[in-house]
Amino acid sequence: MRKLLPFLLIILLISFSSKAYSDYSTPGTGVSWTLTDLVSNSSGVVTFSGGEYYLNDTLVISASDTIKVTSNGNFKFAGNTMIDIFGVFRITPPDSFKITAADTNQKFLGLKFEEFSDPSILKKVIMEYGNAIRLLNSDMIIDSCIIRYNTQNSSFGSGAIALFQSNPMISNNIIYRNRRAAIQSGANISSAPKIINNLIYENDTDNGNYPQINFGATGTDTILIKNNIIRGGPFPMAGGIAFLPIGNANIRIEGNTITHNRYGIALASANTFAIIDNNRIDSNNIDNNPNTGGSGLNFNGNSTIVAICTNNAIRGNLWGVTIQGTAKPNLGNLTTPTPFDDGANHIYGNGNSGQIYDLYNNTPDSIKAENNNWGTIDFDSVEAHIFHKPDNASLGFVDYLPIAPPVNIQEIGSNKNIQSYYLHDSYPNPFNPISTIVFEIPVVSFVKVRVFDMIGREIDNLVNQQLSQGSYKIQWNASRHPSGIYFVRLEANGLVLSKKLVLSK
């Protein structure tokens, strides 16, 4: 027995010394504290040393309590620690506030925002070397943050921002090199965030079958994914945007650049209503295996997938648009009274194995794809680029007539003295039915020229491509539209210029 005592003593010492601190919860009495207050009150869970704050064990911000950070600084987390927020956590520094691992080999879990944390804000926060920002029933704001290198393999969260029944605003962030998706919610968990103006790239460092934005159901609310850049990189299994809902999904995907992913946008399963408009879906081919990906747009499910696709530029993918099961997207239908499903997509230059596949209808049903630009007005060429009933009698027919003629963008000068973006007055104005639009761009830019009606509805997309420095003119033919006041809008490099046009018939 005497020989066992030293061994037992060692075990006891290890047991009592393995955790130097205990979890700490704020008092829940409505306090409004700073990190300095936490240092004073948390019994060592939050400490301050060498000009930096340290989280040594899990911190709980209790309901009714608020923690505010309003200055720049660093907050270093010990391995497997987290902050669980039932109250409010607001980080709003003038420049930046970094949340990082005390030891990058011992990554932390992250931040968990619970119900009643809606007033919380993460602004100008750098979060790295953890697992996730996790939201449960929280409609908080995440703005102007950098979220990177969160590769901790933990069930705490799958995506770098992981949502559960949450509708946050996620805007103006840079999200890259995280373990799986940049932003994620479960298939049967209704979340409908607003994801606006973010740079999202090179996520899925696990190189698993994960898109960079990965969602399921949205419930009755609508998820908005707008004006983001979603770019792949060295991880060929990473897709762009995917939805696989168990339940209802209401989706608006607008104005995004989705490029160099395994695929662009994929809608699967059922009970989905989506508007997909004004996106650049380009060169999603990094897996280079047409049997496992490469679609610009993919619809795979039954007829309850209702998608309206207008004014998108879809090119350079292994497949342009692929339709499977009995999905029935609307790629252009001129027979409806509304002008907002009139096609006007630019679908060309997609293909693999030496064959162009701009649209592949692998369903038994007919598909409307009228009034699109297929890169040519030659009927035989367009027919050769669409796989449907004439190629396999068991497949449905694609109605692609009429073909929208390519917009003739005429360069009228490459003056190196052009110093700024400029939209000239169109001429003639008033007009009937054709007016000429002239604009200048000072540097190579991705340019959009669109026309809107008086109440802000887009009715035509004239330019949606990269242009070199120079002066350009295009013609807008408004023969399909009624007399009235319209606005032409030039968009490039974050700048928006607008001019009024009067159509008088």
Image: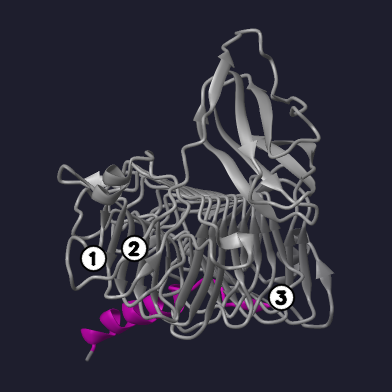
Q: Is residue 21 magenta?
A: yes
Tags 2 and 1 in contact by the CB under 8 Å rule? yes
Q: Which residue is mark 3?
A: 117
Q: CA distance from mark 3 to mark 1?
A: 54 Å
Q: Is residue 272 above or below residue 477?
A: below
Q: Is residue 68 above or below residue 414?
A: below
Q: Residues within 10 Å of mark 1 (few under 14, many from 20)?
A: some
For label 1, the SS is loop
Decide which of tag 2 and tag 3 comes sooner along the chain.
3
Q: Residues within 10 Å of mark 2 (few under 14, many from 20)?
A: many
Quadrant housing residue 381: top left
Q: Residues within 10 Å of mark 3 (few under 14, many from 20)?
A: many
Residue 182 at x, y = what percent?
47, 59
Which three-letter amino acid code belongs to the residue tagged 2? Val
Q: Which residues are magenta?
A: 2-25
Which mark lies nearer to you, 2 or 3?
Answer: 2
Which three-letter amino acid code belongs to the residue tagged 3? Ser
Q: Is residue 464 above or below residue 389?
A: above
Residue 22 at x, y = what percent?
57, 77
Q: Is residue 381 left or right of residue 449?
A: left
Q: Which residue is mark 1?
A: 389
